Amino acid sequence: MSASYHYTFNIGFKETSVSIEQDVPSIETVKTAAVLRGTGSSAKPAALVVCDTNTASLAKAVIGKTDTPLCVLETGEKAKTLGSVTTIILAARNAGLGRDGLIVAVGGGVLTDTAGFAASCYMRGCALAFVSTTLLGMADAAIGGKTGVDFDGVKNLAGAFYPAQAVFMPLVALRTVPSREIKSGFAEVLKTAILGGYEHEDLFDGALPGVGDIDGVDGYEAFAPLLARTVEYKGRLVEEDPEERSGKRALLNLGHTFGHALESAAGLGALTHGEAVAWGIARACELGVRLGVTPEPRAQRIAALLERFGYETRNPHPAITDVVRYQEAMQADKKKRSGRLVFVVPTGESAVCVDADEKQAE
Ligand SMILES: NC(=O)c1ccc[n+]([C@@H]2O[C@H](COP(=O)([O-])OP(=O)(O)OC[C@H]3O[C@@H](n4cnc5c(N)ncnc54)[C@H](O)[C@@H]3O)[C@@H](O)[C@H]2O)c1
């Protein structure tokens, strides 16, 4: 039996519908879902589908026999640029999209962030839908309305909060995602489970696409309930704090301060983002225990979970060859936050933001 999950989230002034299903949706299905949540008009809008060279076959499956225009970008973080936004805007104009037009991004987090930002600018904002095709995209990037591109060497320097009206997560797309990328995305699944306090539940038994034993489409079906739980938790958290103002949404940064510093010290590309985040979660647990915020048994349970899925938790990480660079990266993070070093650390059932400087002063 095919797994299928549907959610609706109210993110700021917009509603986002999310569908986790086996197959890619047709362009008609995407249009219907986006229009229902968007303008309220019953007419089907003109659409532009945007993909990268790795997701072109999935995008063509969405388009089917229709003559919907396709805009193909380069792959990877290097394509997350204002240049790609320009390419999308030009393609939208050439396709004759009006203000009621629809941009459909088919791809991973780079693609949805970039096309989402283009949609936020096109004619002051057109309709937007995502067909998310990586695990990181499904578990994190496609939900919550953060769009943007890198600029002048700074990640996500230009961007906007602009949630998609409709998000589709076709499990079949995960079959072709390289296992290293799956393992990277799976760290965000674990992170969300720790925030939600459900990391000990049996959802994790056998749910290891590309990370453990299960391979092929049946494995992804077995994984669907865990993905659904991840999406629901993130969606509800974002509903409470759509523009990251109250501190609720900031909890999603669990493991990221240590993780970013590790990524930086290990050298670009040496580790995946998820590997660094998983290691960062282990460090956040250590800090939490030291500060008396994380109960020791929970820290041990989290470390065991990370290790069970093959993530490195030992300190120092074997990839840190340059300790000074690691410390400098921590300080750079501090500068970004008005001089304060803020960490998210696990509590008994979820996590909390702590200001390390304040805690030390106490
Ligand atoms: N907006 C947010 O809230 C948010 C959250 C987390 C991460 N992000 C962003 O997401 C980006 C990373 O996302 P990502 O890891 O999905 O990167 P990505 O989009 O670059 O995808 C990774 C690689 O997999 C390929 N790919 C995509 N789908 C595929 C498929 N089905 N089969 C085979 N290959 C496929 C891509 O072409 C790319 O080469 C970063 O830029 C990050 O900043 C955004």
Image: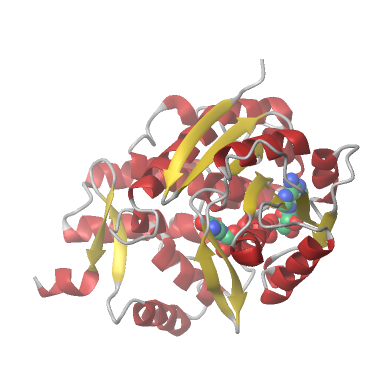
Residue 300 drawn above or below residue 88 = above
User: Which corner quadrant holds the C terminus?
Assistant: bottom left
**Residue 306 seen:** no
Q: Where is residue 241? Give x, y as percent.
A: 34, 53
Q: Position of residue 192 (x, y in %)?
A: 42, 45
**167 and 179: which one is in front?**
167
Residue at 35% from the left image edge and 40% from the top image edge = 196
- Most extreme residue toward the left is 362
User: Image point 32% across, 45% down: which residue?
Assistant: 300
Instruction: Pick out the residue farthest to the top.
Output: 1
Whole-percent x and y of residue 248? 31, 53
Q: Measuring 29% from the left and 59% from the top, which residue is drawn there? A: 247
What percent of the width, then of the height, locates residue 54?
Answer: 81, 54
Q: Residue at x 66, y 20 (%)?
A: 2
Judged left or right of residue 323, residue 298 is left
Q: Nearer the viewer, residue 235 or 348?
A: 235
Q: Is residue 6 above or below residue 357?
A: above
Q: Quadrant of ligand 1?
A: bottom right
Task: Answer with left or right where residue 68 lies relative to residue 295.
Answer: right
